[in-house]
Amino acid sequence: MLALKNIQILYDRAIEAVRDVSLEVPTGKIVALLGSNGAGKSTILKAISGVLYQEDGEIMSGSIHLEGEPISGRSPRAIVEKGILQVPEGRALFATLTVEENLLMGGFTRSRAEAAEGLERVYQMFPRVKERRTQISGYLSGGEQQMVAIGRALMGRPRLLMLDEPSLGLAPQIVDTIFEAVMSLNRDNGMTVLLVEQNAQLALQTASYGYIIENGRIVLDGAAEKLRANDDVQEFYLGFSGGERKSMRDVKHYKRRKRWLS
């Protein structure tokens, strides 16, 4: 469905955030993009969504295609109308609007009837959101805001749903609820998902394929179960070595590889 090829992204035409990144998100699959803070994960999502300009970012080379059609350089609205919806890191709700008003903002490209149907789908998926529908969004808990943010994206009937750090700062029980919803959307509705996460264990349990990015470059990729079994991933990203839990500062001999194919 989605293909990035040899993407290079600069901020202020001086700071290179992403270099020569290529990745694919097949139709109907969940693909994880993993890496530490500042690795370039969110920049890639912003490039796909067409909002790099908001931070003086620019795609300098490479291409982004949706089902073979180039989308680089298109407006954010045009990309949304193509069916690519993003749930940004930090939720980015309209804090002074009610929950339902936030949801309806996500369905701005849909008819009134489609928006009403969308609301019912969101409320069925997240009953807590329905309970809070008349409340001001800024007063919700972090977990409730994340549910609203995902619901707002779903109002646009995405073909590709992009999630930027959906587990960040949330209690484990809320994280479980959100990831169960994501897996249900994929399993029951065939929704394609690009998942950006720092929680590698959770992401690789959810996705079928994963990419690991460091300093703006893809350094490892492969099927999720094979990445989980990879010694470097276990030691550096999952915190295991020799069957024992290790902290990041204890890791001495991580070998960075360009690609992982075996």
Image (cartoon, rainbow, N blue to C red):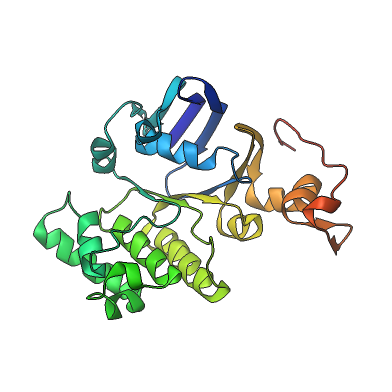
| Location of residue 229 in the rendering, given as x and y in whole percent from the top left corner | 76, 52
Seen from this angle, which residue lies furthest bottom?
Answer: 131
Quadrant position of residue 243 = bottom right
Residue placed farthest to the left in the image? 112
Give the side of residue 126 with respect to residue 104, left or right. Answer: right
234 horizontally vs 168: left or right: right
Can residue 12 be seen by looking at this rendering?
Answer: yes
Residue 94: where, in percent of width, then height? 28, 58
Q: Is residue 1 visible?
A: no
Q: Residue at x 27, y 40 (%)?
A: 82
Q: Count the labels in the image.
A: 0
Residue at position x 37%, y 28% from top?
Answer: 68
Quadrant in which residue 79 is drawn? top left
In which quadrant of the rendered image does the C terminus lie?
A: top right
Q: Is residue 141 above or below residue 150?
A: below
Q: Nearer the viewer, residue 162 or 230?
A: 162
76 sits left or right of 147 in the view = left
